[in-house]
Image (cartoon, helix red, strand yellow):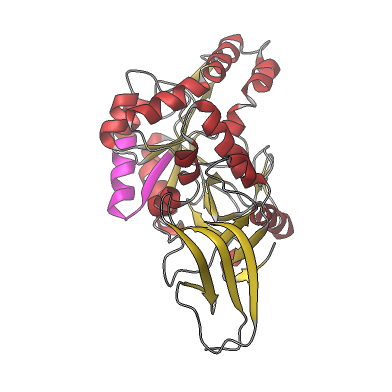
Amino acid sequence: MSDRAVLHVKGRVLVGPEEVRDEVWVIDGRISYDRPTGAADVRTVEGWALPGLVDAHCHVGLDQHGAVPADVAEKQALTDREAGTLLVRDAGSPSDTRWIDDREDLPKIIRAGRHIARTRRYIRNYAWEVEPEDLVAYVAQEARRGDGWVKLVGDWIDRDLGDLSACWPRGAVEAAIGEAHRLGARVTAHCFAEDSLRDLVEAGIDCVEHATGLTDDTIPLFAERGVAIVPTLVNIATFPALADGGASRFPRWSAHMRRLHERRYDTVRNAYDAGVPVFVGTDAGGALAHGLAGAEVAELVTAGIPPVEALAATTWAARRWLGRPGLEEGAPADLVVYERDPRADVRVLTAPRRVVLNGRVVG
């Protein structure tokens, strides 16, 4: 055994929603359920332990104006860490954040490269802006740069139409998604409205972000194909303010955004009830603050998802979906300890007692 301190977490260790152990040991930064022998320096932490939370839609290195300097990206990552988020799927960023991989004190990131949007159809300075004939080439580029994901902008406001509309013709997304899959990457897409969803799902997309445009016609298609959604309800809460800001210039868009907001909880609950996989994401890093994964879990519960399932959407199930371990024997010791059982009240997620990353108590 090395001279590195041993951490003993005892109380209730939630290995899974029903699998609960009394203790876990952290030895050389990894999980062990065997009591070590001969450890000279043991630190004990007590409480209810969970795998580190997952924010499956987050943007480290991005703010409302575009890419940010490394020191700002570091603060964003630290904010997530202090809130217990230890695994991030970065759903699009123009910043190169690979340096974070060398920092054992910062959350682990699964990158989707940079957003790929239609020309003049997304937030300025965020995405590669291309036309359909170039979509496959840019998807291939970002598939090679990312960590197994690519992010498309599936819809956005069409200023001539005055409302949200799909960005890509069906043939373009079929070819692009096919190319990503050939290169071993999964594809997700930003989608607020209704009209892009069927084409994307039938083209083979793996996930849809926000998915506020789901209807009784498309929910069964998502369920049948196993296409996941990341609702980002803490971000959808901003729709009324956005609608107010654009009401005079784009009244049709404004009314549409309000309708999507009004039915948001029904949309998520109906998707969950139909068997659509639902995961936690916040959309932090644009105009939204980091560290909101716990608040998003509470939003899922408000929408009608059972608390244990909402908890799984940021812990056990989310980690399986992203191919990362939880609290299995030998896994990196990324865990969060709480005062009370989070299965009984998910609001406890916003107040971690201790945060352990790579086996070290960091918060």
Q: Is residue 239 above or below residue 102?
A: above
Would residue 304 be visible to someone looking at this image? yes
Would residue 170 be visible to someone looking at this image? no
Name the quadrant containing residue 358: bottom right
Residue drawn at 62 percent across, 38 percent down: 295
Dominant secondary structure of the magenta stretch? helix
Q: Nearer the viewer, residue 310 or 144?
A: 310
Q: Is residue 174 magenta?
A: yes
Query: Percent x, y for residue 194?
Result: 42, 21
Name the quadrant containing residue 95: bottom right
Q: Is residue 230 above or below residue 93?
A: above
Q: Nearer the viewer, residue 50 or 344?
A: 344
User: Along the horizontal axis of the image, is 205 left or right of 98?
Assistant: left
Residue drawn at 65 percent across, 26 percent down: 238
Query: Percent x, y for residue 245?
Result: 70, 19
User: Along the horizontal axis of the image, is 188 left or right of 203?
Assistant: right
- State the extent of the magenta-drawn residues as a range: 173-188
